[in-house]
Amino acid sequence: MPQLPRVRRRDIGERAELAGYAAAAVAEVEAALGVPPDPTGAAFFDVDNTMMMGASLYYFAKGLAARKYFTSRDVASFIWQQAKFRIAGTENPEDLGRVRDNALAFVAGRTVEEIVTAGEEIYEESMADRIWTGTRALAQQHLDAGQRVWLITATPIELASLISHRLGLTGALGTVSEIEDGVYTGRLVGEPMHGEAKAIAIWALAEREGLDLQRCAAYSDSANDVPMLSMVGRPVAVNPDTELKAIARARGWEVRDFRTGRKAARVGLPTALAAGAVAGAVAGALAVRRRRF
């Protein structure tokens, strides 16, 4: 049975654990086409700044805004609060809980079919050309070896699965939304797929699929993903932030950087901040709109 090395179960919050198990439960399982499958080896790729340039949820929210799912006035009123949270870290636990609970408020009341259709259009408009060819090639190497490849991301599972399918991968582990009668409630199952939740999701999927984690690989750009990187036999830092790059060097992990020059220095942090501010503002704005009406 796969173990959970370097991640102490007692330190994992109940919501993170619930999110991880929920993500594993809905993850798709498909054999690599045309290649004899390697049943115990697999690879897990983070999405934002690892598989694609920028943050997928930012482009998704931007695309929904263009389709009049919410107004720019709604978004503007929440930009400062979200920027303060992301940059200064001054929010109290109650504020953090509100951000978490409203993380997918912008899809509340919408049908799954509607959001998936919009996601397909937005992917073609804003995301397809942002896939890192180098990272996609790494994923293909695993597929060619008969291993399954999952994306693992805080992006909603529906969008994560769509990206995975477009890239010809096995499936995805993402943030799971609560759905009632085919309609989003706006609430999450657990919390966003982040940090320790990713480690739990991989552990749960490995347990279900009989994966040998020492034969698995994981790829990420962020130090937030050290828990999942620490679980596998082949951790790889891709386009790493400063902290992850230092950790990777200290631990002897592989480092792959597909950025160049000044672009490499600035692509990670500003993009993440912009995504957090805009996507978070979108969520807050829709939560307030529901209270108004």
Image (spheres, rainbow, N blue to C red):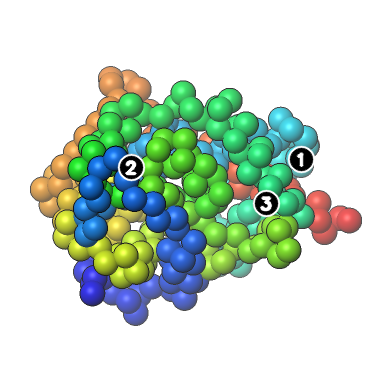
- Using the image, determine if residue 130 lies above or below residue 68: above
**Residue 126: quarter of image:** top right
Q: Residue at x 48, y 71 (%)?
A: 18
Q: Which residue is mark 2?
A: 33
Tag 1: amino acid: Phe
Whether residues under marks 2 and 3 lie with C-beta atoms below 8 angstroms apart, the answer is: no
* Left or right of residue 181, residue 136 in this image: left
Screen quadrant of the C terminus:
bottom right
The disc label shown at residue 70, or none: 1
The mark lying in front, picked from 2 and 3, is 2
Q: Earlier in the sequence, mark 1 or mark 2?
A: 2
| Local SS, label 3 | helix
User: Is residue 65 among what the camera can see?
Assistant: yes
Q: Which residue is mark 3?
A: 112
Q: Residues within 10 Å of mark 3 (few under 14, many from 20)?
A: some
Q: Secondary structure at mark 2?
A: loop
Residue 205 to residue 225: above or below:
below
Where on the picture, by quarter, is residue 220? top left
How crowded is the residue under tag 1: few (<14 C-alpha within 10 Å), some, or many (20+)? some
Instruction: Residue type at mark 2: give it.
Output: Leu
Give the mark nearest the N terminus, 2 or 3: 2
| SS label for mark 1 | loop
For residue 136, above or below residue 90: above
- Residue 46 at x, y = what percent? 37, 46
Kind of residue indicated by mark 3: Val
The residue sitting at 40% across, 38% down in the picture is: 168
State the CA–CA distance, disc 3 to disc 1: 18 Å
Q: Residues within 10 Å of mark 2 (few under 14, many from 20)?
A: few
Question: Viewer-proximal residue, 275 or 153?
Answer: 153
